[in-house]
Amino acid sequence: MKATIFHNPRCSTSRKTLALLEDTPGVEIEIVDYLKSPPSRDRLKALYDKAGITPRQGLRAKEDLAKELKLADASDEAILDAMAAHPILIERPIVETAKGVRLGRPPERVREVL
């Protein structure tokens, strides 16, 4: 099974989720450092749709930039635009497999799509 993780190596939760994937037999992992290679706005929307969450639920709302951009009251479309322009606003990690997409918070949630 292939699993794609949108990963930030500086994030402890993202590292724990990657370790969980690495410890799962039969999983071929594609690691995307989303800060260096961010998903497009459309790709991000598709990931959230597949995960059954809103862009707001995928927003790092406590990030200073989110506050500066006043995203607390923004529409989902505005949040997606901001995430596409500033990938630091994307909550991580996101894991995608053929079975679905999960935001790895907590990391154990990704087991649902393995």
Image (cartoon, rainbow, N blue to C red):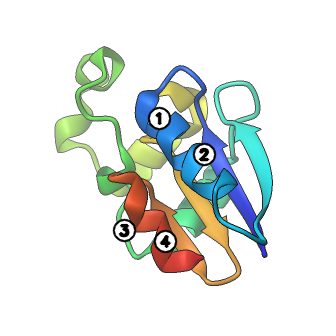
Q: Residues within 10 Å of mark 4 (few under 14, many from 20)?
A: some
- In the depicted structure, whether residue 50 falls above or below residue 79: below
Image position, residue 49 (x, y; %): 49, 73
Mark 4 near mark 1, Cβ–Cβ under 8 Å?
no
Q: Does residue 44 appear left or right of residue 78 in this picture?
A: right
First in sequence: mark 1 vs mark 2: 2
Residue type marked 2: Leu
Tell me the distance, in whole angstroms, between the alpha carbons under discs 2 and 3: 21 Å
- In the depicted structure, whether residue 105 falls above or below residue 12: below
Q: Does residue 78 appear left or right of residue 15 in this picture?
A: left
Mark 1 or mark 3, whichever is nearer to me: 3
Q: What element does badge 4 sit on?
A: helix
Q: Which residue was labeled with disc 3?
A: 53
Residue 49 visible in the picture: no
Disc number at residue 38?
none
Q: Which residue was labeled with disc 2?
A: 18
Mark 1 or mark 2, whichever is nearer to me: 2
Q: What element does badge 1 sit on?
A: helix
Q: Nearer the viewer, residue 87 or 72?
A: 87
Tell me the distance, in whole angstroms, between the alpha carbons under discs 1 and 3: 17 Å
Disc number at residue 111?
4
Q: What element does badge 2 sit on?
A: helix
First in sequence: mark 3 vs mark 4: 3
Residue type marked 1: Ala
Q: Which residue was labeled with disc 1?
A: 82
